[in-house]
Amino acid sequence: MIQTKGTRHCPLRAFCMANEHVINAIRELAEGLLVNDPDNFLVDIRIKPTNNVKLFLDGDKGVPVDKLVSFNRKLYPLLEAAELFPNNDFSLEVSSPGLDEPLKLHRQYLKNIGRKVEVTLLDGSVKEGNLVAVTEETITIEELIGKKKEIKSTDLKLNEIKHTKVCIVF
């Protein structure tokens, strides 16, 4: 997995290095399938120690379930042919990132303009508001401040954000 914020500690260095090699190979295969599908994009790949491959796809207008199923059916034989796992002992799950998954890519921020988000900054502070603008370096949210619920526009630098999640509004 390519992380944009923070790092993960891996006590088994050799496993992590091999895992990164496998993830990069899977990324190339997946992106090859997405070349003719400009509306959809790869968000993340995770591999559990049980060789369960979880691949997250997103789209500018969402990703329908039938598209995820089709992608899984195309990618699975490619992974078998690549022989990335001993005895081809692996499972593959393809899904869209759920609401519990933080936004990771610039394209996801763009897709979610107009939605309410919760932004956790590296210093631990949390901002909540409507995402109104995105640039290469910042996002702008409109927060409701005080008892009178005045709107305050706040620019946040992407490199100061720990994670951003889309809020569910009922």
Image: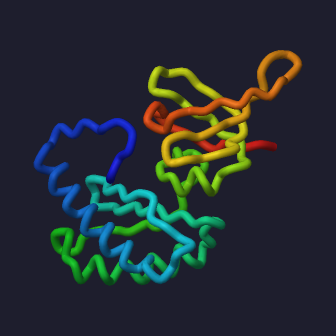
Q: Residue at the spot x=24%, y=70% of the render?
A: 89
Q: Residue at the spot x=17%, y=74% of the render?
A: 87
Q: Is residue 122 above or below residue 19?
A: above
Measured as percent of width and height from the top left, residue 70 is found at 51, 81
Please, which colouring scheme is shown? rainbow
Measured as percent of width and height from the top left, residue 86 is found at 16, 69
Extreme residue in the left direction: 14
Q: Quadrant of residue 46?
A: bottom left
Instruction: Judge from the rendering whether residue 152 lies leftward or rightward of residue 149; answer left or right.
Output: left
Q: Quadrant of residue 142?
A: top right
Q: Is residue 112 above or below residue 141?
A: below
Q: Nearer the viewer, residue 2 or 12?
A: 2
Measured as percent of width and height from the top left, residue 37 is found at 51, 79
Q: Is residue 69 above or below residue 166?
A: below
Extreme residue in the top direction: 147
Instruction: Judge from the rendering whether residue 29 lies leftward or rightward of residue 128; answer left or right.
Output: left
Measured as percent of width and height from the top left, residue 72 is found at 44, 76
Instruction: Judge from the rendering whether residue 133 lies leftward or rightward of residue 106; answer left or right.
Output: right
Q: Nearer the viewer, residue 132 or 165?
A: 132
Q: Residue at the spot x=57%, y=66% of the render?
A: 59
Q: Residue at the spot x=48%, y=67% of the render?
A: 41
Q: Nearer the viewer, residue 121 or 12?
A: 121
Quarter of the picture holding the C terminus: top right
